[in-house]
Image: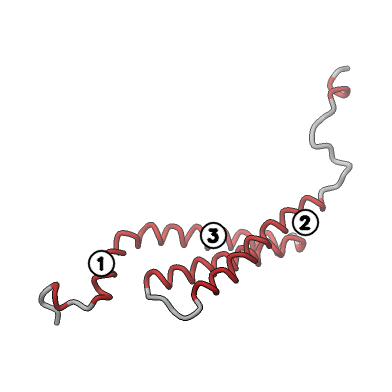
């Protein structure tokens, strides 16, 4: 049993500094998980948006790798794993918006022309 602060292992001292981050990190985790869930639901209904779901999942994974490194300790190739999931995740999310934009029919006007408003 630990009786004095001097007897605490160094990893416990580190954990005490991270304790205030637990609740905000939980909120951020729920936000990312919810975003990934919504992206997956959209991809199920509109197959052209599969890059959105995959990109959101990769982004969630990159943040999970960061959180493990912060709260549990680093591991080999952590930085590379973050970049190999973050970069493609962002690229896929942007690509999905381009695919959805291309899917919009040209026959639907974005705005009503002024000539049609004046009768």
Is 115 situated left or right of 74 in this image? right
Tell me what residue is drawn at x 54 percent, y 60 percent.
Answer: 34
Is 12 situated left or right of 82 in this image? left
Q: Is mark 1 on a helix, strand or loop?
A: helix
Marked residue nearer the N-terminal end (2 or 1)? 1
Q: Which residue lies furthest to the left in this view?
A: 3
Q: What element carries label 2?
A: helix
Dot 1: within a 10 Å radius of its alpha carbon, few (fewer than 14), some, or many (20 or more) residues? few
Which numbered marker is on residue 99? Answer: 2
Marked residue nearer the N-terminal end (1 or 3)? 1
Which circle, 2 or 1, is nearer the viewer?
1
Tell me what residue is drawn at x 29 percent, y 69 percent.
Answer: 15
Q: Distance between the residues labelled 1 and 3?
A: 28 Å
Dividing the picture into quarters, in which one does residue 52 lie?
bottom right
Q: Name the one closer to the observer, 115 or 68.
A: 68
Dot 3: within a 10 Å radius of its alpha carbon, few (fewer than 14), some, or many (20 or more) residues? few
């Amino acid at each position: 049993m630990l009786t004095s602060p001097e007897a605490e292992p160094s990893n416990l001292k580190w954990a005490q500094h991270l304790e205030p981050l637990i609740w905000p990190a939980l909120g951020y985790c729920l936000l990312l998980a919810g975003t990934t869930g919504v992206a997956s639901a959209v991809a199920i209904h509109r197959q052209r948006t599969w890059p959105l779901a995959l990109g959101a999942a990769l982004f969630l994974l990159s943040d999970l790798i960061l959180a493990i490194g912060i709260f549990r300790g680093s591991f080999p190739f952590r930085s590379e794993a973050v970049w190999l999931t973050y970069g493609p995740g962002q690229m896929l999310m942007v690509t999905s918006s381009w695919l959805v934009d291309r899917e919009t029919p040209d026959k639907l006007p974005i705005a009503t022309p002024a000539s049609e408003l004046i009768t």
